[in-house]
Amino acid sequence: MADQTDVLVIGAGPTGLTIATDLARRGIRTRIVDAAAGPNTETRALGMQARSLELFEKHGITSELLARGLQTHTFNVFSENHQILRTSFAQLDSPYPFLLMIPQNEVQDVLAANLATLGTRVEHHVELVALTQHTDHVTAELRHADGRVESADADWVIGADGAHSTVRRLLGLRFLGTSFEENFAVADLRMKWSLPADEFFAFLNRGRFVAYFPMLHGWHRIAVAQPERPTPTGAVTIEELQRAVDVCAPHGAAIAEVRQAGRFRINQRRVESHSAGRVFLAGDAAHIHSVVGAQGMNTGIQDAFNLGWKLAAVVRGWAEPALLDTYAAERAPVARRLVKGTRRITRMTLLRNPVSTAFRRRIAPPVLGRAHVQRTLTRAISQIDVSYHDGSGSAPHGRVAVGDRAPDLLITGPGGEAIRLFDLLDTDRHTLLVLGEEIHELDGRYGHHREFVHIVQVADPAAASAYGLAGGGSVLIRPDGYIAARSTATHPAILDEHIRRASSGHVLEHR
């Protein structure tokens, strides 16, 4: 099998493109195919969270994404024309304290162009029809546009082929969960109203719900809950949309222009297992949920960053195959938390009973107005709080533990200049931060780990304090920006143990 691919990616949405890029930039032989005849040109998902923007710095494309999107800092929710929430991302502990409103097709365009610079292009109109797993590889049957069926071998296969995943079906994995009764209409349109053009708005009104997501150049994406029975069918008309706006928007608001519109049903599902043998599932193939919170595309992207470095490490021989078991162990709790949370929020937004809506209107403002509640909410929406420390899928504010996101901060560099700690992290390997202690011969102490670990001395005590090691110590940070190990010691033997555990997927916190 001289021409065998290391990794075959099925599906060229944001998740598939992200993981193909993460692998290709590490020199992994990667092939990506998609059943569609060409790139998606529709808006579909909208909204990129702070954590995704942080991770895309590793691919060098964050600035291009920022140029193509609208930064929205403020989140507003109204219940029966009474405001129950106004919160800001401005205090978010991230270099990107906002929600970037960028359409999915723009994200895919940036990702595909970047992937092409690495020598890998999406093969469109190539459909997966069969999978056969062997001891040391997988055989995929791929049907091309001309009807030809190709037998393609790969060491590993990743199914990133969406909610109706062929990979998931061929694996025989169940998609756990149920569909909501409510249906939604979505549309890209222009509004005539006096509200700010760069803020998010959601209006709830006795079972009716319209969310307004701002976009560049005065456009909005709106999502409309449709409680009517029978459920509307056929094309979404401007009259139907205007009726929803009349109920769920300030008085006098009107639709000026509609660019595209469609319908969908909310599903809340997650796959019973993120992997089977040499095949993995990521993105919507592994979990789907409500549009509330703009989490879907981001969760898939972060699936890709979690799996990408691990799979590359195994292919390179840097890590044991057992490391790949941590993909499901870490991402499944995140998916469970997401499905549970969006289900709860969606049900709250679609309350119809007058007593329930009155209770929401009266109780929500004082509760949601509390500083710690707003901080928790914005951290969750931005996915800054995602953690692999335990089975909860999230980390409380202020905690710094193994499995949590490594905190960023401005520190004083060697020349007295202010630099971001994130800028010291390697884009490919683990990074060892040696904190507080002045060590002038790092290569002599740690040099034999250079292939696997980028080693940095950080003398600024602010960094040590941020990582809970005010007396000095060492922190091993994974390629996806999460803490692999912490120690109050900087002795090479401690690092040796951390590396051994990181490569096998079993890391512990040393105190």
Image (tube, rainbow, N blue to C red):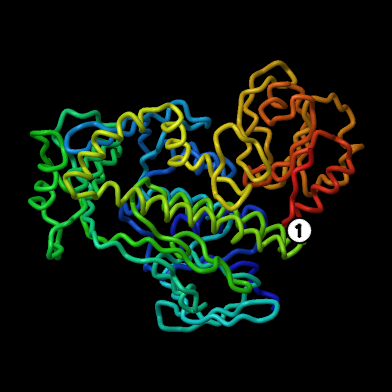
Q: Amino acid at mark 1?
A: Ser
User: Is 303 on the left-hand or right-hand side of 343?
Assistant: right
Q: Position of residue 369 (x, y in %)?
A: 36, 28
Q: Position of residue 325 (x, y in %)?
A: 66, 63
> Which residue is label 1 attached to?
504
Quarter of the image for residue 277 reads bottom right
Q: Quadrant of the N terminus?
A: bottom right
Q: Position of residue 499 (x, y in %)?
A: 80, 49
Q: Nearer the viewer, residue 149 or 283?
A: 283
Quick one: SS at disc 1? helix
Which residue shows up at 50% across the image and 52% down it?
301
User: Is 69 on the left-hand or right-hand side of 113?
Assistant: left
Local crowd at mark 1 within 10 Å, few (<14), some, or many (≥20)? Answer: some
Q: In this view, which residue lies farthest toward the front? A: 355
Q: In this view, which residue lies farthest toward the right? A: 444
User: Is 482 on the left-hand or right-hand side of 392?
Assistant: right
